[in-house]
Amino acid sequence: MRQFSGKRLLVATHNAGKLDEMRALLAPLGITCVGAAELDLPEPEETETTFVGNARIKAHAAARATGLPALADDSGIEVDGLGGAPGVYTADWAQTPSGRDFVQAMTRTWDELEAVSAPFPRRARFRSTLVLAWPDGHDEVFEGKCEGQLVWPMRGAQGHGYDPMFLPEGHGATFAEMDRVLKNQISHRADAFAKLMQSLGD
């Protein structure tokens, strides 16, 4: 496994909430993160049908464009009652002509569960796949998940994405009600990051 030993890492995301989470997770290691949007990098088209495929597209595009090692995350929510949907298409379900609307996406998800009379608890999991890519084309992959269930109506104003309807296993608060520090300890991204840590050199 190749180790990353720098102190400045390019995070290949234009999602401010995701960048904030990554900054918080990497700050204790003394690693400063810069986002793709801050460098005016274009968002590559995500054409793969897997989380790892799309994370690779984003990480390698950023690494090639800047000559820097780049970290990309592709994540989403899998709902058992919908056969694993929206999965890799989580962000697509939120897409509107004026940007992403996750209230719309969450409403659609619950409406579809109601339409099929999905049993309770309505099990779901967040998945996160991290790809750390170097300009020479090498990459390392780290995968994480967080099990839980969906609740309705939406609860909480913290976080982003599907956080207001996701109740992580063993907890009484949704991700959107939860203190950010706690969320960053138990989330799907935290699980993937725990595996990433072994590739971060001293």
Image (spheres, rainbow, N blue to C red):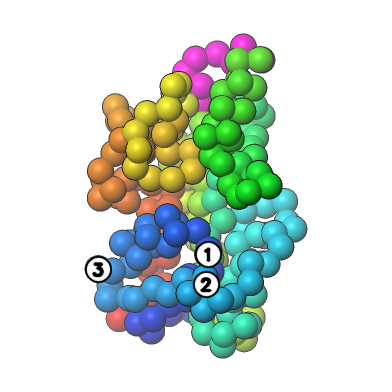
Side of 74 where 5 appears, left or right: left
Assess disc 1: are there few (<14), some (14-19) or many (≥20) residues with their C-alpha within 10 Å of its C-alpha.
Answer: many
Q: Residue at x 34, y 33 (%)?
A: 156
The answer to whether residue 142 of the structure is visible from this angle is yes
Q: Residue 36 carries which label?
A: 2
Q: Residue at x 47, y 71 (%)?
A: 35
Up the image or down, 79 lies above or below 64; here it is: above
Where residue 122 appears, x then y in whole percent?
51, 22
User: Residue 82 sits in which quadrant?
Assistant: top right
Side of 84 where 146 appears, left or right: left
Secondary structure at badge 3 equals helix
Give the magenta range. 116-123
The three-letter amino acid code for the residue at tag 2 is Ala
Q: Distance between the residues labelled 2 and 3?
A: 21 Å
Q: What residue is shown with label 1?
A: 13
User: Residue 89 sits in which quadrant?
Assistant: top right
> Can you name the residue that lies furthest to the right here?
47
- The answer to whether mark 1 and mark 2 are in CB contact below 8 A is yes
